[in-house]
Image: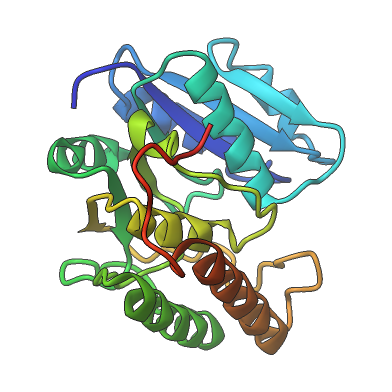
Amino acid sequence: MNGRVLVVMPLYNEEATLQEVLEAVLRYAPPQADVLVVDDGSTDRSAEILARFPQVRVIRHPENRGYGASLIDGFRYALEHGYDVVVTMDCDAQHEPYLIPDLLAALEDADIVSGSRYLPGSSRGQDPPPDRLRINREVTERVNRLTGYRLTDAFCGFKAYRAEALRRLQLDEPSYGMPLQVWVQAARWGLRVREIPIGRIYKNPHRRFWGGLDDPEVRLRYYVDVLEREAARWLSQPASRGEGGP
């Protein structure tokens, strides 16, 4: 897809993978694309590594605000600076930068393109941790019932958005449930959504979720609460012409 592209990468204590991921992103992103890292209060050597990449733009949070808050800040930056497309991906080497052109190509006939670890063609890589697979399946089914979409992976952070789609969204969930706001509000505005297959890569199957969400059942309840709140807010009545985000 043509237009100005910004790659937004939330970061929290990923010193082990940050350099290799940034090098790959700069290799595979379109030549004129910009890269923005939102450092969410990292306490490791991430800032030192970022300093090796002067071409990478950085927003720093003085304290950890959450995965969703980092993406929301990245979206705001993109809209304020006139970008046409936003690609989001993580810094932990779970997303493969060589697929950035595939996301952008799929955006030609979509408003949001999301990677899926569970589509046909997504089999390469490791088996997912059982609790994550179970929660993803249950929440994805709930999302589909509410929205009418046919998603296979509600939580993949490797996405591409048209800027005009992002302008319709009012996102305010600071933690890991923010993608659920995206799906509900996308359905509200009739946005076109596509998935493309990506690999399943779990560099750290025992990673922490922070914010009290390490317990799978607590995490599931949190996701369901976010989803139900968004559905009540956005899907209880038809959209009116002229409504939208900032």
Above or below, 123 relative to 14: below
Would you say 167 lies left or right of 226 here? left
Counting from the top left corner in percent of width and height, residue 20 is at 50, 36
237 or 206, nearer to the observer: 237
Query: Where, by quadrant of the figure, is residue 213 drawn?
Result: bottom right
Identify the residue at image location x=30%, y=14%.
Answer: 31
* Residue drawn at 49 percent across, 37 percent down: 21
Q: Is residue 159 visible?
A: yes
Tell me where residue 29 appears, x and y as whole percent.
32, 26
Q: Is residue 142 or residue 154 the one in the foreground?
A: 142
Q: Nearer the viewer, residue 153 or 230?
A: 230
Number of disc labels? 0
* Residue 208: percent from left, percent from top: 71, 67
Question: Which residue is rendered at x = 24% and y = 67% of the image?
Answer: 122
Q: Residue placed at 86% from the left, 33% from the top?
A: 62
Question: On the picture, is 9 further left or further right than 61?
Answer: left
Quarter in which the N terminus is drawn: top left
Q: Can see residue 156?
A: no
User: Which residue is the extreme one toward the left?
Assistant: 109
**With respect to residue 74, does 103 lie above or below?**
below
